[in-house]
Amino acid sequence: MLLPTGLTTPYLLVDLDVLDANVAAMAALADRLGLQLRPHAKTHKCLPVAARQLAAGACGLTVATIAEAEVFAAICDDLFIAYPLWVDEARGRRLQAVAERVRRLAVGLDSAEAARALARHLGPGLDVLVEVDSGHRRSGVVPGEAGRVAAAAARAGLSVRGVFTFPGHAYSPGAMAPAAVGEAVAISRAVDALRAAGLAVEVRSGGSTPSAAATVPEALTELRPGVYVFGDSQQLELGTADLDGIALVAVGTVVSRYADRVILDAGSKVLGADRAPWATGFGTVPAAPRARVIGLSEHHANVHWPDPPALGAQVAVVPNHVCAAVNLADELVVARGGAVVDRWRVAARGANT
């Protein structure tokens, strides 16, 4: 990726051509699989990126919070909050306001108690999907319990549209295909449980960036990947992206130089601090395959780098987890061929409620 000249570091840089290629590639994959694409907007948090995804054929957007839904309702009329919300009176008012702005709003849940709270604070008719744990061991009920939760939601007056899961255990070397198979099995069992409870199943929602290519299409009706738009160092190390598919980097300046390492001014407040146990560092340096980001402080990136660059040099680093890095930035600098063409506000930055 060519770096613009004359910009003050640190900042996040987006290559517009690569971004558009990534959006098109995932849309084409979903089409080949015969599935709807509902990208997760928590990765980019930017209205211009969401607009590109919708223009490429996405059926709607996935978000993680009510606050994100409030932002993306400005450009999308079909939103799914893929999170087991616990709704109180204040959240209920906010959800109702979003529902009045869009054509369709769906919410996740994974307990009968959450279903009753939703109905109590919003009234009947809200679309819901029951979350199923397909092996990630995060939120979601075991598949056989999905019918019980769905029946409780229906009795409370909610409109049960189906089930969803997140195969997050695909984020590990060699786990992509097994996670996709586990997702298919879990969704199938959950669907059987809903049907046994007398409920129809319209939506079977799943998917992630690393498992997308291994998806069992018969198990799902829609995919919800997020990271694919930008790519990140995790995807590079998992083998689900290559450097040509990296659309976002953090750009920092060499502020200290030693025999075999440098310090960049892009620390954890720029790159984010995520590091999976299997990751080789805190980010990837595209210009130097042997370089490793070995440590982060708030404003320091400590990079092991044989034959390091000179003081003052600007360096691109691919963050480990791009969702976390974007959430730390006020804006993204957008370039094509090394020339800045736009700046995009991270409109849903900090939209955590």
Image (cartoon, rainbow, N blue to C red):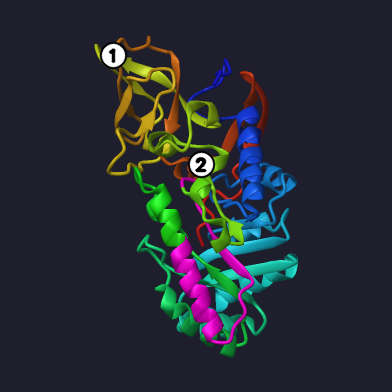
- The residue nearer to you, when weighing 108 against 345, is 108
Q: Which residues are magenta?
A: 184-210
Q: Residues within 10 Å of mark 2 (few under 14, many from 20)?
A: many
Asked which quadrant contains residue 145, the reply is bottom left
Per the model, the C-alpha gap separating discs 2 and 1 is 29 Å
* Residue 196 sits inside the magenta stretch: yes
Give above or below for 150 relative to 257: below
Dividing the image into 4 quarters, which one contains the N terminus? Answer: top right
Give above or below for 157 relative to 97: below
- The residue nearer to you, when weighing 70 against 244, is 244
Secondary structure beneath dot 2 equals: helix
Q: Is residue 302 left or right of residue 104?
A: left
Q: Residues within 10 Å of mark 1 (few under 14, many from 20)?
A: some
Q: Which residue is mark 1?
A: 306
Residue 309 at x, y = what percent?
Answer: 37, 11
Q: Is residue 83 left or right of residue 275?
A: right
Task: Say which residue appears at 52% left-offset and 56% top-offset.
Answer: 216
Secondary structure beneath dot 1 equals: loop
Residue 37 at x, y = what percent?
Answer: 64, 53
- The residue nearer to you, when weighing 175 against 282, is 175
Task: Say which residue appears at 45% left-offset and 55% top-offset.
Answer: 180
* Residue 126 sits inside the magenta stretch: no
Task: Say which residue appears at 52% left-offset and 31% top-offset.
Answer: 246
- The residue nearer to you, when weighing 123 against 27, is 27
Residue 157 at x, y = what percent?
Answer: 62, 87
Give above or below for 34 relative to 262: below
* First reached walking from the N terminus: tag 2 or tag 1: 1
Q: Is residue 305 in view?
A: yes
Task: Give the residue type that dot 1 points to.
Answer: Pro
Q: Is residue 184 left or right of residue 33?
A: left
Task: Give the residue type that dot 2 points to.
Answer: Val
Q: Which residue is mark 2?
A: 326
